[in-house]
Amino acid sequence: MPKPLTNVDIDLVRTFVTVARLGSFTQAAEQLGRQQSTISLQIARLETAVDTRLFERSPRLVRLTPEGKVFLDYAQRMLDLNDEVVARFGEPMVTGLVRLGTPEDFATRHLPDVLARFAQAYPSVALEVTCDLTLNLMDRYRSGDFDLVLVKQEPSVKAKGIRVWREPLVWVSGGQDFLDQGGLVPLVVSPPPCVYRKRATTALDRAKMSWRISYTCGALSGALAAVKAGLGVAVLPKDMVPSGLHVSDGGRLPDLKDSEIALLQTKDLSLPAQRLKDHIVRSLG
């Protein structure tokens, strides 16, 4: 007689993804509106169901095991499919407009697939996406121009909104070693206000290295073209460095640490905006 298949409870999967994203049973309990003991029990049930230890636990740390990291990819896909089915058949009449603000570089690399899956699940929801510098996005968010906005922020500060992404920043160039040329470090930057521009100049100042602005461009494509042409060095998230550019992380240029993206929401979100918020958090987390 064949062994009966094990069915994985989608509610346990959702709890797992929340704990993995937040790195805390306590914070997951707060976000899901449950007791911490309930969260711990759900994770234990999930680990029993898949016969695998998914988290390493200590008094100060909760992190994924190697098997947990593999399972996280499956878990996120399970939630995407589950929520797409629910949206398609359970909420077929969700309609309206959602206004989303995002930094251009983040939108270029990470958002297309996320938004495409949302559009497939909610075909009657119109998305209005605006790309701009973070500080400009914040000004427009405060003015009520957006329902949701993704912004860059320093990991060291108290989080505003929900942290949805984090990755290291690196120096990139066309392959030239500008430090061997002596003088000032030439920087390819976006016009102020720009988080990466400030991060670059602050890091160089702290390292007591002289610098100059060699090229300013508000468009990511223009900045990358300038770097490839050898006009200077720029700062990018490591995962966004295109082929053909040289990464200088751990060299003579100072450490830039991590980049963090947070999702902010306006008060009294509409149902379509709430669904997009949940989708972004789940997909990027």
Image (tube, helix red, strand yellow):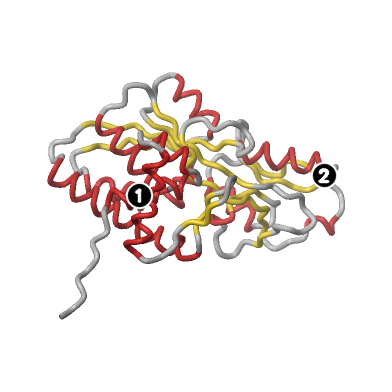
Query: Could one spot residue 226 in this view of the protein?
Result: yes
Question: Residue at horizontal 22%, vertical 31%?
Answer: 96
For the view shown, which residue lies furthest in the bottom direction?
Answer: 1
Name the residue beneath numbered marker 2.
207
Res. 111 in view: no
Image coordinates of residue 164 in percent, x first then y, are 46, 43
Observer-nearest residue: 150 or 89? 89
Picture quarter containing residue 99? top left
2 or 1: mark nearer the eye: 1
Q: Is residue 283 left or right of residue 244?
A: left
Q: Is mark 1 on a helix, strand or loop?
A: helix
Question: Residue 161 placed where, x, y %?
Answer: 47, 31
Residue at 61% in and 51% down: 168
Is disc 1 surrounded by few (<14), some (14 to 19) or many (20+) residues within 10 Å?
some
Name which of mark 2 and mark 1 comes first in the sequence.
1
How many circles with numbers are drawn on the protein?
A: 2
Q: Nearer the viewer, residue 262 or 179?
A: 262
Toward the viewer: 78 or 129?
A: 78
Q: Which amino acid does label 1 sit on?
A: Gln
Q: Mark 1 points at which residue?
A: 42
Identify the amino acid type marked 2: Ala
Q: Quadrant of the N terminus?
A: bottom left
Quadrant of residue 279 in the image? top left
SS type, badge 2: loop
Q: In this view, does 85 lie to the left or right of 74?
A: left
